[in-house]
Amino acid sequence: MLRAFVNAFKIPDLRKKLLFTLAMVAVYRIGAWIPVPGVNVELLRAARGIGEAANVVGIINVFAGGALQQMAVFALGIMPYITASIIMQLLAVVIPKLEALQREGEQGRKKITQYTRYVTVGLAVLQATGLVTMARSGVAFGENVIIGGTGTVALIVITLTAGTALIMWLGELITQRGVGNGMSLLIFVSIISQFPSQFQLVLTEMGPASPFNGWEYVLGLVLLGVVVCVAVVFMEQGQRRIPVQYARRQIGRRSYGGQATYIPLKVNQSGVIPVIFASSLLYLPGLFAQVSGIGAVQRFVEQYLESPSSWVFIATFAAMTIFFAYFYTAIAFNPVEVADNMKRYGGFIPGIRPGRQTAEYLDSVLTRITLPGSLYLATIATVPFIFIAVTGIPQFPLGGVSLLIMVGVGLETMKQIESQLMQRNYEGFIS
């Protein structure tokens, strides 16, 4: 693997992409530590609130690289963009115009991306307002950390919204000019950056009354993390190969086709997207409860939809993960389109008639293999919360969501680098 890294930096264009990606990541991390104007920095450093919450708000803070705890410029992180993407994909199912744009190819995707940006800005304004409300009321950090009145609040909301727009731009720049998917890499870096502080928090809070010694608990977490990583790699690499045979065609003096290939259907066709979708949507009830100011709603959300020890929260998280696994798989893979393309080019699955029967066969296979994939995602995502609910230990740094995203994004990024290395006859990471 070290040789592969060395080979990657030997290639000029790949070296430029890697250095550009690292530069954008550095800008992102700097923005996660610059506080917005109008906050009391000393109170923020001494406060215990969002940053140590072992609930969905704590997950959002991890996705933001700790910026939410710091009330930094990038405090909202990438979540408004993810939520906007969910909304646009849901609307594309029910609005014919958006569905037609998806089928227009590159131009249609550009228009949908532009609409997603507008929705992201709107959601950023809404979430920034909710965050400032929580910070002023003392719910987020235990006391009011906002200095100033209405003008200061408006300035903070504008700053947080601009920070979200800048993150969105950085992610798109990484995707276009760097290596890997920009949005996923930013989340990956955010999660990695929080591990040292989370382990330090575990060592600090594991007192004499705890059933485990702090270092024993950390060692157990690391071993469990290794086991989860192995399971994630195994499931992410698992696939069902559908054999495809192409008929031989004679055009003039040349013969085309006749070769056998396969369609790789992954067990986890949707990747880490369902977990991210579920996490981002579970953030909305807490935001709504804080903005509404209704005590009964706030108590209900805090007890059942934000507490990691609540079985309602665990069941809701698992159900949403399973739903989005099926939903995103249905969007990402269209059996009818695949079957039509195979029929157009003379391909067929042995024993299955081309056309409608091929589409039905692909749909049935995809539905069957998505079930274990979705259950695997739900299990990995909820294991930390089940552990907290059963043992009562408040901290679980190596969360299933974090490891799932880290391993998934790491594998996809390595595959992209490896494909460019293989094009130049260099040995890759996996090979």
Image: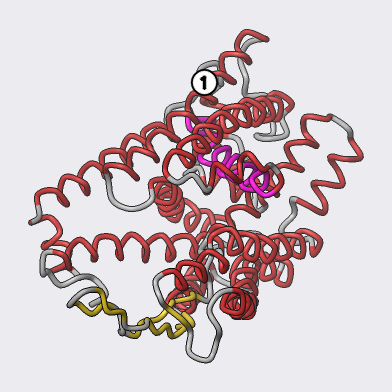
Relative to 194, residue 30 above or below? above
Identify the magenta region: 71-93
Left or right relative to 294: residue 142? left
At horizontal 59% and vertical 51% (from top left) the residue drawn is 59
Left or right relative to 265: residue 395? right
Relative to 59, residue 152 above or below? above
Q: Say whether residue 144 is visible.
A: yes
Amino acid marked by disc 1? Thr
Q: Say whether residue 393 is visible.
A: no
Q: Residue furthest front?
A: 252
Residue 136 in percent (x, y) is at 69, 23
Quarter of the image that includes the N terminus = bottom left
Q: Residue furthest bottom?
A: 351
Residue 22 in percent (x, y) is at 26, 44
Quarter of the image that includes the C terminus = bottom left
Relative to 173, residue 162 above or below? above
At horizontal 84% and vertical 40% (from top left) the residue drawn is 298
At horizontal 55% and vertical 57% (from top left) the residue drawn is 273
Left or right relative to 138: residue 183? left
Residue 289 in percent (x, y) is at 80, 37
Q: Kindly identify which residue carries mark 1.
A: 159
Q: In which quarter of the image is residue 390?
A: bottom right
Q: Main secondary structure of the magenta part?
A: helix
Q: Does the magenta stretch include residue 117?
A: no
